[in-house]
Amino acid sequence: MPDWTWLLDAPEVRCVDVREASPGETAPWPQWVSDEVRARCAAQGIDVPWSHQAQFAELAFEGRHVALTSATGSGKSLAYLLPVIAATAEGRLGVEVPTGRVRRAAHTAIYLAPTKALAHDQLRGAIALGPRGWAVSAVDGDSDEAERRYAREQAGLVFTNPDMLHHSILPGHRRWARLLGGLRYIVIDEAHRYQGIFGAHVAQVLRRLRRLAHHYGANPTVLLASGTAPNVDEFAARLVGAPDVAAVTTDGAPKPRRTVVLWQPSISLNQDTANLLGRLAHLGTQTIAFVSSRVGAELVAREAQEIAGPAVAGYRAGYLPVERRALEAALQDGSLRGIAATNALELGIDVRGMDAVLIAGYPGRLSSLWQQAGRAGRCGDEALVVLLARENPLDGFLFDHPDALLRAPVEQAVVHPENPHVFGPHLAAAAQELALTADDERWFGPTLLDVVDQLVAQGVLRDRGGRYFWTRADRAVDYIELRSAGAKPIDIVESETGRIVGTVEEGRADAVVHEGAVYLHQGESFLVDEYLPAERQALVHAARPRFYTQPQSSFEVSILADRAQRPLGATTVHRGDVRLTSQVHAYLRRDERTHEVWDQTPLTLPRRTMITQALWWTVPAEFVAPLGWGAMEVGAAAHAIEHTAIGLLPAFAPCDRWDIGGLSTALHPDTGLATIFIHDGLAGGAGFAWRGYHVADEWLAATCERLERCPCDDGCPACVVSPKCGNANQVLDKQGATTLLRLLLAGR
């Protein structure tokens, strides 16, 4: 057993929770599993399956859409591989299915992962388990033409991701007719990751995939593997667009002994994380530190290297493929003992020797917390998980109520495929792939024709006797980016060499690569010289400043539609549609170590608008009068309530702080009153604000409690100070917020 006494006895430890190991529950092999497969499993140490693996495989073999929810490392791969191997390698099926319109179509399967790393890792596992000569292939943006041709013409199982499916396979479906015509299974791994705007996009891609498979004569069964979610069957049905999805929710895998530590940083979140990462790696404990931001991951890796040297590195989205592969290989062979990663590595490769996980700040969802925690102890060895508190209301609330972290069920998974900013563009893409008709309601739902009529009126589609066609010569899919609501990302280019250092999504570019911004990449620092959004580039040069930059923004909210209201104490909570107008107008330079502000520099960037969903509540004028406050006092109190409420919403809705935003004002022109808005941060909305509307009683009561219990005098990051605030947390009144919200909730 590893000796972690030095860590467990540290004064920063707020709580230690130990869960003892538990044995697994096995089940007999399904009768249809061949002797060859059983022998290959035995060679890998698998004598019999766990109960959830056998149950899932049986349902899949019978042709049922089925979702499996179980812990990280519980063997979900074997559960889906058993029926897939039976169909695509052995030609055996549990039900009679069409063979496709493609001549002599063999049975095929498509595996979808949210990351390239996970797809390639699963490919390696499939090759190890499958029979010799089984044609399997991975296809993604890094694949060359020969690899793509092999997948099209030979492969029985193709490992890919939603982006490749959307941008290449579906638009070029005629070239992929063999794969689509024989499609027996669609495997969706890590399905719980498909929430928010990304989930809405993937839901529409899956509908397009099933529609084209049907066109070629196939009727694929969808198999979903997910982290723990209490509503996995309902969520899976909405994601896939199928009315009946069976659920396997009993996890039969054994669990290692796990020690969970709640750590209150004594220096700062990043510094404490770096110190723990460096020391654990130096002592030989292979450790992943999950850090919420790209900049944070780079800073933590750099500080940890001062303790453990090159045995520590950073890992995040935006790295080039060759960089990712090298880091993944080093983790696999153990030469890399520590890594500071964003959630780009939350589900990527299977690092079986991982001993410890550090989580720098609550990740926003319990499902993400336990997904990250599950990366430790995956060989049955004891696992250490350290959650370090971030200075924000949510972490403060959860550290005050550890059972809400350690004993609470995970939140429900939410996907909103009907998002109009997603649905319409995907219908256009579907029409280009194959003309739309009224019969396509079976794939896209009863609102299909209403949206199609709008697209026809906009000139996007053309009606030819009830058949709807794409009207342009270019590709509809090129107007859709799955991982954002905007267009293609911005390239970050080193001026002297022309090297692409990394990329950033268009929606974040104003804040991340404005002129003067510091951009960090794999321990290197760059200063942005020119930001050229029209050319989709930011030009940078290598530098080593002793500061980092923080953008400053202004926001306006306009109410477009008030769709529902309900009373709450002395106020009324509303939900509806709003228009957001924002602008990055300046940036701060902050000291790299002390975080003190050096100066502020103005910027000239365009105003951006977006329509999304929001909830809001007002402060009645007659309610404020007895307090004797002026507009400044009301605004400062409302601003503080807004910050704390945003920070705590992730405890009650399946989102994190960066999925949502807010605005508060002493007098809003649309309500005529002091008003507090909380809105989704994505065009069209993702359902988070609407969820907040339904849980407002509990959520705002917790907000009031956090304001009351935080020990600071004038406000701090654990209550009212927000890292997202567009005006640098000016005009905040914690005591006024406490008084105002307490009276509002009491109704007097």
Image (cartoon, rainbow, N blue to C red):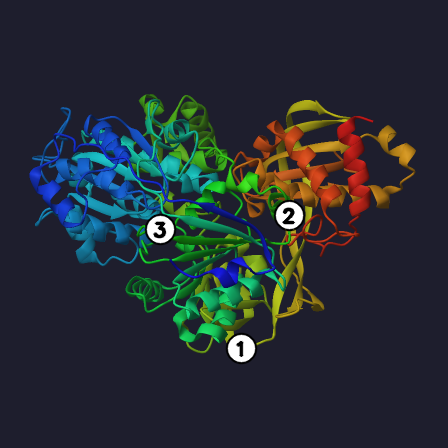
The residue nearer to you, when weighing 536 against 37, is 37
Asked if labels 3 and 1 touch by Cβ distance under 8 angstroms, the answer is: no
Q: Secondary structure at mark 2?
A: helix
**Distance in Å between CA atoms under marks 1 and 2:** 36 Å
Viewed as shown, does residue 606 lie left or right of 37? right
Rendering coords of residue 206 (x, y %): 33, 35
Residue type, numbered disc 2: Gly
Residue type, numbered disc 1: Ala
User: Which image quadrant: the C terminus?
Assistant: top right
State the count of labels.
3
Rendering coords of residue 335 (x, y %): 32, 69
Residue drawn at x 86%, y 34% as measured from the top left = 624
Viewed as shown, does residue 696 lie left or right of 316? right
Front: mark 1 or 2: 2
Rendering coords of residue 286 (x, y %): 38, 62
**Distance in Å between CA atoms under marks 3 and 2:** 32 Å
Asked if labels 2 and 1 touch by Cβ distance under 8 angstroms, the answer is: no
Residue type, numbered disc 3: Thr
Give the label on residue 396, or none: 2
Rendering coords of residue 734 (x, y %): 78, 47
Front: mark 1 or 3: 3
User: Which image quadrant: the N terminus?
Assistant: bottom left
Relative height, residue 406 to residue 348 (above, below):
above
**How dense is the environment of label 3, judged by Cα within 10 Å: few (below 14), some, or many (20 and up)?**
many
**Residue under circle 3?**
115
Residue drawn at x 78%, y 40% as measured from the top left = 738
The residue nearer to you, when weighing 508 against 622, is 622
Q: Earlier in the sequence, mark 3 or mark 2?
A: 3
Q: Secondary structure at mark 3?
A: loop
**Residue under circle 1?**
543
Q: Secondary structure at mark 1?
A: strand
